[in-house]
Image (tube, rainbow, N blue to C red):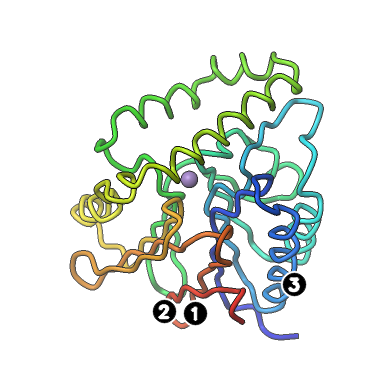
Amino acid sequence: MATREKTYFVADTHFGAPPDSRGREADFVRWLDVIKDDAKTLFLLGDIFDFWFSYKHVVPRGFVRVLGKLAELADSGVEIHFFTGNHDMWVFDYLEKELGINTYTQPTEFEINGKLLLVGHGDGLTKMNKSYNALKRVFASRLCQRAFAALHPWVGFSIAKKWSLSSRQKGKKNIKKQCRPNEVPVFCEAKLKEKHYDLFVFGHRHRVENEDVGENSQFFVIGEWIENRNYAVFCNGQLEVRDFAKE
Ligand SMILES: [Mn+2]
């Protein structure tokens, strides 16, 4: 068995969303099988599920193989960190309680191999998009969550699926979104004024980006798992974004 020294990152698998979620889940499980022997740490950087709500007594159907394989990795000693994305912010403590996966809702720092990393999903990082941030605050509120929990899941999940579909269609049509100013470098530069970070790692933008910010600092946006099979690996102080479909 190889030594466990590598740190892996993956984001935006959007399990449950068309097209062919089952195929993406199968690829993801195969990927976890490949990395499980040399992975020390696995970061799931949000929007892993296209929608999730953790009810008190019932669990949403789907993703069984993914959850099973994550359980296998967690049980075998891989340290797993899950960041909620805008699609799966209602995971709450489900993964923590069931699988022992640490769950975060905000960008969080980690020291890995002597480097300081700031890691997160990557949405709502700055005050640049006020309407998005306002909507996010509503969804993060206890009141909104309690109201959703009180709906029958059949109703709740019907609403959520329609919402997710319409936001995806808007995203496809809205080319402007692609030209919208990128919050990531703005956020990184502000953070670097407080403290030095060697690397910033985010998902959310569904593309691969890598730029220098400040002195001796870089940010990475690690792509997605719908059209590509992007992931990132951190080893010997270097982060590299790869595509599992091309391996
Ligand atoms: Mn997202």
Image quadrant containing the C terminus: bottom right
Please determine whether, in this image, residue 30 is positioned above or below residue 124: below
Give the number of the disc on residue 235. Answer: 1
Please determine whether, in this image, residue 166 is positioned above or below residue 113: above
Image quadrant containing the N terminus: bottom right
Which amino acid does the dot numbered 2 rest on? Gln
Give the number of the disc on residue 147. Answer: none
Helix, strand or loop status at disc 3: helix
Q: Which residue is mark 2?
A: 238
Which amino acid does the dot numbered 3 rest on? Asp
Q: Is residue 145 left or right of residue 27?
A: left
Mark 2, other Cα within 10 Å: few <14 / some 14–19 / many ≥20 = few
* Mark 3 Cβ inside 8 Å of ligand 1: no
Q: Is residue 185 left or right of residue 205?
A: left
State the residue at coordinates (81%, 29%).
58
State the residue at coordinates (21%, 50%).
190
First-in-chain label (1 vs 3) = 3
Q: Label 1 vs label 2: CA separation?
A: 5 Å
Q: Label 2 vs label 3: CA separation?
A: 23 Å
First-in-chain label (2 vs 3) = 3
Helix, strand or loop status at disc 1: strand
Please provide percent x and percent y for residue 182: 28, 51
Please provide percent x and percent y for residue 104: 53, 44
State the residue at coordinates (18%, 54%).
193
Q: Is residue 33 left or right of residue 199?
A: right
Give the number of the disc on residue 33. Answer: 3
Helix, strand or loop status at disc 2: strand
Residue projecting furthest to the front: 173
Q: Are marks 1 and 2 in contact (CB under 8 Å)?
A: yes
